Amino acid sequence: MAKADTLKRYAFGALIIMLIILASATVVEKIFGKEVASAYIYGSWWFVELWGILAIIAIAYIICRALYRQKAVFLLHCALCTILLGAFVTFLTAERGYIHLRQGETLHTYISENNTAELPLPFDIKLVLFDIAYHPETDEPTDFISFLKVGEEMCKISMNKIYSFHGYRLYQMSYDPDEMGSTLMVNYDPQGIA
C-alpha cells in the first residue's frame, strides 16, 4: 500500500507540473506564436519525457493497486496510455511543414516545420484559385479558401476543411496580403490517422 501511495503522490506531482507547463505553453503560443510553442515546448524532448514518466507511473499504479480488477478505472488508464503511445509514435514518425503557393503555381516540395529542409511530396500541388469570404457588413474574413489541383484531383481547402491525399493532410494556414497566394500546413503521419 505504501508503494501505491508513493506512486499516487508522484502521479499528482507530475500532473501538476504538466498543468503548469501546458498553461505556460498556452501563454507562449499566444505571445510568440504556435511555431515557438511547438518548437520549444510541445516538440521538445523533455516534454515527451514528462508524458512518458506519467505513462510509466500510471502503468505502475495500475499494477500496484490491481486496478485491472476495476474494469472502468482500468479501461480509463489503458485508454490514456494508448493515447500517449499514439502521440509518441506520431512524434517519432510524423513529418510536418508548410507549402506556400501563388495562384497558378505548381510545387512538389514543402518546407519542414523547423525551416531546415525542403522535403519532397509524391505529387504536385497547384493553387488554381484563392478566395476569401467576408462578413456581409464588415471587412472581416469568415473563411479563406484554396482551390487546388493535387495530383490529378481537384479539391477545396478552407479554414475548417482539410484535404487528405496519400497519407498527407493539407490544412489552410494563412494567405498573402494581396490575396493571390496561400500557405498550407502539410502533415504526413504514416503510422497515424490518414
Image (spheres, grey):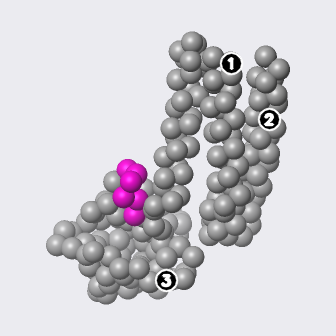
What residue did someone put label 3 on? Answer: 117
Please report the residue visible at 39 percent of the width from the left and 54 percent of the height from the top: 191
Q: CA distance from mark 2 to mark 1?
A: 15 Å
In three-dimensional space, the C-alpha distance between marks 1 and 3, rounded to whole angstroms, equals 48 Å
Label 1 or label 3, whichever lies nearer to me, is 1
**Disc 1 and disc 3 in contact, CB within 8 angstroms:** no
Q: Secondary structure at mark 2?
A: helix
Between discs 1 and 3, the one toward the N terminus = 1
Residue 62 image offset from top left, x and y in percent = 63, 24
Measured along the vertical axis of the image, is residue 83 above or below residue 185? above
Is residue 164 something that shows in the picture?
A: yes
Q: How packed is label 1: few (under 14 Cα within 10 Å), some, or many (20 or more)?
A: some
- Residue 177, x across and y down, in percent: 51, 83
**In this rendering, position of residue 5 left or right of residue 100:** right
Disc nearer the start of the sequence (2/1): 2
Q: How many numbered circles does the render carry?
A: 3
Query: Which quarter of the rendering shows the N terminus?
Result: top right
Label 1: state its secondary structure. loop
* Neighbour tally class for label 3: few under 14, some 14-19, many 20 plus, Cα within 10 Å: few
**What residue is at 44 percent from the left and 83 percent from the top?**
118
Range drawn in magenta? 188-193
- Main SS, magenta residues: loop
In this orientation, does residue 129 appear? no
From the viewer's side, name the closer residue of 26 and 143.
Answer: 26
Q: Nearer the viewer, residue 127 or 131?
A: 127
Q: What amino acid is labelled 2 in the image?
A: Tyr
Identify the image quadrant of residue 94.
bottom left
- Which one is earlier in the sequence, the residue at label 2 or at label 3? 2
The circle on residue 10 is: 2
Res. 24 image quadrant: bottom right
Q: Is residue 122 magenta?
A: no
- Residue identifier under label 1: 65
